[in-house]
Image (cartoon, rainbow, N blue to C red):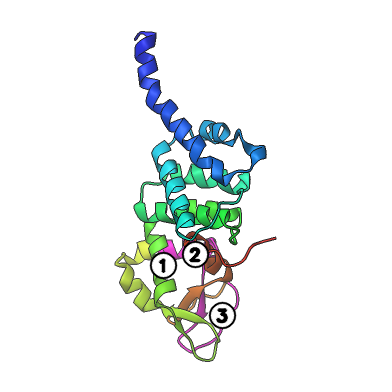
Amino acid sequence: MNDEGGGELLKPVAELTESLRKLIAPFSGPVLKELGSYVAGRIQFINFKRSLKVLEQAKYLLDERGIKPQSVSLKILVPILEGAGLEDNDDLIEKWSGLLASAASGGRVLPSFAHILSELSPSEAKILDYICTHRKKLEFVGDSGVDKQDLEKAMGLSIEDYGIRILNLRRLGMIEQVTTDAMRWQAGHGGWGAGGDVGLTALGESFIDACKGLPKTTVV
């Protein structure tokens, strides 16, 4: 292959790198002017177009609310773009976009959120969304949740697949059982009896809010 042919093959990659650098600029401060090149080097072996899509969607979310992007910490920005570049599910790509938008608008985004999102399957994200959407205020315990049996039925998974996904969400600290059939409070993440209701932990609640791109408070 001659040099001219090789140059033609590399041209689309160079164009994507430049597009990535320009889109990153609003999310980084003046001191980080070389950030685009740095990130492009980090994610050169993953899907550029997915990272670009997340940057574009995040900017759209911010523009829609009239919010000027703030500089995002490298500990948050780089893992988001790397994780998004490996994502092939549209619903999860939307969550990556929301996470970046939240981080760029002063929302409560912990560095661990990108790691958590990278470990979620589409089914696990669906479980979290279902709990968030269908939860109800529970009597006596002062919390909210959904019936465990209703949740299992709504997911349409085998018992084994459902159980594995619940275990992973518990491992990540996203969900906890808030009542048993006897309406007994279960503190922390350890108790998981038969029947009852499951709800979001404080960490799970904050994570879901961040992925919506709707900032509430800022971590100092």
Q: Which mark is residue 208?
A: 2
Residue closest to the eye, 187 or 130: 130
Q: Which residue is mark 3?
A: 186
The residue at which mark 1 appears reads as 129
Residue 140 coordinates in the image, percent (x, y): 54, 91
**Which mark is drawn over residue 87?**
none
Does 31 appear in magenta? no
Question: Relative to the observer, which residue lies in front, 148 or 6?
Answer: 6
Left-right relation of 192 to 50? right
Which of the two marks, 2 or 3, is nearer to us in this view? 2
Could you tell me if the residues under marks 1 and 2 are in contact, i.e. CB atoms within 8 Å?
Answer: yes
Quarter of the C terminus within the rendering: bottom right
The residue under the point 57% across, 55% down is: 103
Say whether marks 2 and 3 touch (CB < 8 Å).
no
Q: Is residue 191 visible?
A: yes
Q: Residue at x 51, y 55 (%)?
A: 101
Amino acid on which the number 2 mark rests in the picture: Ile
Farthest right residue? Answer: 220
Q: Quadrant of residue 47?
A: top left
Mark 1 or 3 closer to N-term? 1
Precedes in sequence: disc 2 or disc 3: 3
In this picture, which residue range is highlighted in magenta? 163-188
Instruction: State the residue lying farthest toward the left.
Output: 156
How far apart are labels 1 and 3 at the CA level? 22 Å
Relative image position of residue 151 (x, y in whole percent): 37, 74
Specify few, some or many for label 1: CA neighbours under 10 Å numbering under 14, 14-19, or 20 or more: few
Give the farthest residue toward the bottom.
140
